[in-house]
Image: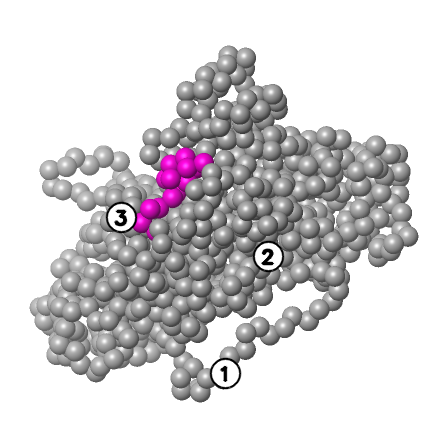
Amino acid sequence: MAQSQSQTSFFKDLLQQPTQQQSLPQQYSSVTKADTTHYDELYPAEQVSGAASEMRQHWRDFFGYLQPKGLSDFNARTKEIERQVRDNGITYNIYVDENGPKRPWTIDLFPLIIPHDEWLVIQAGILQRATLLEAIMQDVYGEGTLLKEGLIPPALVNGHPGYLRSMHRAIPKDKKHLHIMAFDLARGPDGNWSVLSQRTQAPSGLGYLLENRNLLSKQFPKAYEQMRIESLTSAYRGLVQSLKRESKAGQNAHIVLLTPGPYNETYFEHAYLARYLGLTLVEGNDLTVRNQCAYLRTINGLEPVHVIIKRLDDTFLDPLELKEDSTLGVPGLMQVIRAGNVVIANAPGSGFLESPGMLAFLPSISERLLGQQLLLPAMNTWWCGEDAAFASAQENLVNSAVKATYPSLDGHQHFASYLVKNLSPKGYLELLEKIKKSPDDYTIQSYLPLAQIPTWQSANGTSAEQCIEPRSYMLRVFAMSDGLGNSWQILPGGLARIAANPDGIASMQRGGSSTDVWVQGQSYTQLPILFPTPATPMGKAHRDRVITSRSAENLYWFGRYTERSENTVALATMYLESLNSENSHSEVLWNWLDKLCQKNSLMPYVFANESLPTEDAEHRDEKMLLSNLNSGHIMSVGYNLRALQLAASKIRESLSTDLWSMINRCVERFEKDCQAMKMGEDYSVTLALQGLSTANQFLSAITGAQNDRMTRDAGWTLLNIGRLIERLQFFSSVLENAIEEGVLASPFNDTSGFNTLLGLFDSTITFQAQHQQSRDLNALLELLVFNKENPRSIAWISRKLKNRLAKLTNSETRDEFSHVDVLVHLAPQVKEVDFADLLACVKNCIRQAWTISDEITGRYFTHIKNSEYRIQR
């Protein structure tokens, strides 16, 4: 294509080391410019229509440092980012569905670059607005001057569901209600910034922008370094230090991040932030209230909580005082907050500040409370609850946006924002009638053509061919508590949300993407070491990771489903290989394998009164097994892999990115292989074996990460106990069925049965190394039952399980787990091949494994075994 060739030629000339004097070649005209009604981030406004346009200096520098190998380099970089997003499991779930697919987070290739002098304008304006919002909170929940003087209409405060009367006169320590605030900014055609909205309850984006920074700074390391991009680290450190300073526990404060749970649309961000900041990620049922204090339920008792960073809206915080049907909050938490025994970011009751109607009154409030005019204006906004404001808004209503004043609570009219110009004449008249009927529920805001940022559009995107194309965007910036006192810092960066098409709305919910925001520093600076604290003696420096009861349970089942997945993969593989083996197998062996597959949901149960298909038995069994590999049957391979993934998703903050990526890839690859298998017809068995082999390789990597990449704390101990219990049950069940079906009966001439048993125990290599081609039954049972060095033997599993339980309880012997002692001492009693004793042994192993599992559940997860739940001081 001629245009593509000209662009390639252009980049060869353009992407040299940038200098102030370097001018761009004529070929740059092939790159699309923004429409004249939008501010163009790439070109100076006065040169947009000129023939000799030159991009802004910071963009010239950025492209100059890239030095790509033509346009294909941009495609390669884009695909690499997409791959990392998939591997890291970065998601943004628009529609919350625990069984539905999660939408990958989308990141554009080019960052939004803001020069230092432009950022100073934003920084000053946001800092002033953060100060103002805190002053409003103090006044509304304190003296009430603003309401008394009529500077705020009562309907926007007392009539707003976000105003909480129970917080009146509840003054937080250091008088700070707000610790994290987000402001959405738009840049008009004149290049000036305006505030579109503000978020104070649980603003999102702090985790996503960190991941955006991580991905794009790695894509363009030279540009990131040479352009002196401001670091984000100190702002996050400052937030944590500020919260600790305000808590009663000081530097020893226990901070938790309260999340609605893994089905929330931004759960990835919650887990990411918790891991990045070193916080405990908790759900509402992880917390409890005792004596007006907040505590965390852990496997060792109740741990005090001093600071809560909440990621759910205020009305869900406490079902006793707020939304009574909320299952996300903590009963009694509001009383703890009022008593001043917990610092919460942000304090409940700030929801009314998020109303778009508030923006119209902030200029006069600023002059009253701060004695200052706002440095950063908001979009022209009219709250229709005032007749004069509505009359003024109607003068240019067709060029405005309509927004809901209140959230969808307490019977107010709530709707998604929309542009009036998109309405039909009939819709326009209906809008006027709705506003006249319920004027308080409507806010009108001027429409502003958003500034446009250069984006890379690949040929398979929305553009017809690959090119740099301008897209509209909005900028979200954050104000956070600093670590130096009762003040705020503005995060030197942000989250840019980009429209899905050139004239679209910049919204992630409407298919848009995001990108990182690079703020240029004034000069090269070495980051200071913030907030030094006195050195702690080595003996006191160690602090065990807090394991919540919920996390402990998910770790336990993470271990069990990993082991269960390995076992079902091995069983399915063994069955299909036996079906396709050239050697003939006895009916006893087939009966044994059939029952094992049925017991593990790889094949349906067959009852005596059921009629079976008349086709060849082997082909019938083959089809049954193939159809159930990825079915929803409990214990099928596909089911177990998805259960493993679900358990891991609930402990994301405890897992490395590599391990989480491995789990996702394992599930996705197996599902794809199963689809290919169903399409394979004659080759479906071969494809199934290949898919099972690949799944086994992934599971081996997951097992390796569990054993070698996780700290051996109480959480890991429970994970390992889960694996041991699952392994004990499976191998005992294998032996139980083998004895009952006569597979081990003398004379033992069925070498295929012998080999199958070794294969299921994954002990073939060990046996052959010790006994070569011998088929001695005593040697087999010694290896699979009594051997203390074989990690697949019943004796080894029993002893290891006893040791793990002792470590968990910090004791060599505990009465509640005496079952395992019986198990350990029972195995050596079977000295010879006595099938009756051996059968009794393995049946007892199965029973005791269930009993131990129930004991662990009652003691560490549900705590029904604890007569008194201990409070840790």
Any magenta on residue 161?
yes
According to the picture, the residue beneath numbered tag 3 turns out to be 321
Residue 137 in the image: above or below residue 551: above
Residue found 15% across the figure and 57% down from its top: 741
Q: Is residue 166 visible?
A: yes
The residue under the point 42% across, 73% down is 250
Residue farthest along the left direction in this orientation:
836
Q: Position of residue 366 (x, y in %)?
A: 56, 46
Judging depth in this view, the residue of 578 and 189 nearest the camera is 189
**Residue at x 70%, y 47% (from the top left corner):** 74
Q: Is residue 286 magenta?
A: no
Amino acid, disc 2 = Ile
Write down the residue under mark 2. Answer: 490
Q: Quadrant of residue 153?
A: top left
Foreground residue among 746 and 770: 770
For the C terminus, give its image quadrant: bottom left
Under circle 1, the secondary element is loop
Q: Quadrant of the N terminus?
A: top right
Q: Is residue 730 above or below residue 70?
A: below
**Residue nearest the viewer, comparing 265 with 463:** 265
Label tally: 3
Residue range of the region highlighted in magenta in the rendering: 152-167
On screen, residue 230 versus residue 244, left or right, reads right
Image coordinates for residue 555, horizontal then vertical, percent? 33, 62
Q: Earlier in the sequence, mark 3 or mark 2?
A: 3
Q: Position of residue 862 (x, y in %)?
A: 20, 60
User: Label 3 vs label 2: CA separation?
Assistant: 34 Å
Residue 783, image quadrant: bottom left
